[in-house]
Amino acid sequence: TTVAKASFRSVAFADSNLTGIDFSLCNQLMLEVSFDTCLLDYVSFMRLDLRKTEFKNCSMIRTFLDNADLSGSSFINCNLENAVFMGTNLEKADLSSSYNFIIDPEENRIKKAKFSLHGSIGLLTKYGVVIE
């Protein structure tokens, strides 16, 4: 499925299987989406402006978020296993109920982002520390 040049303005995806879609090819002008109980595995959101986007109860395995602006976004109960965060703006984002993510604080902007104590382990992975 291709979304090249498609426009998404005030689109709410619910109970949708969007596996493998490359949203980075869509028309980025006035892009506004939300996701509730969606399969977003292997989806690309690279370089997109997704400020204040809500991801709720989503599987985001190996989702590509490189260089995306996700500031102020909410990741509510999302599985972010092997999701790619590189140069991603996560300032003021809420990841406090999400899990399985690995985010390098030196390669991403995370100022005032919210993480749970358990989830914060994913911020330390690159340092090889053991937390018991």
Image (cartoon, rainbow, N blue to C red):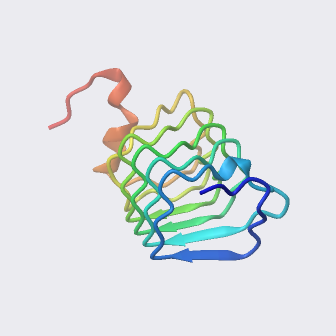
Q: Nearer the viewer, residue 92 or 41?
A: 41
| Quadrant assignment, res 12 | bottom right
In the rendered image, is residue 47 in sight?
A: yes
Does residue 73 sit above or below 25 in this rendering? below
Q: How many marks?
A: 0
Q: Nearer the viewer, residue 88 or 66?
A: 66
Q: Residue furthest right?
A: 29
With 55 as the anchor, is 46 left or right in this view? right
Q: Nearer the viewer, residue 62 or 126?
A: 62
Q: x%, y% of residue 54? A: 57, 67
Q: Quadrant of the N terminus?
A: bottom right
Q: x%, y% of residue 113? A: 53, 51
Q: Residue at x 61, y 40 (%)?
A: 88
Q: x%, y% of residue 71? A: 65, 53
Q: Residue at x 56, y 56 (%)?
A: 93
With 88 as the anchor, is 102 left or right in this view? left
In the rendered image, is residue 69 in sight?
A: no
Does residue 74 sit above or below 132 in this rendering? below
Q: Residue at x 77, y 72 (%)?
A: 9
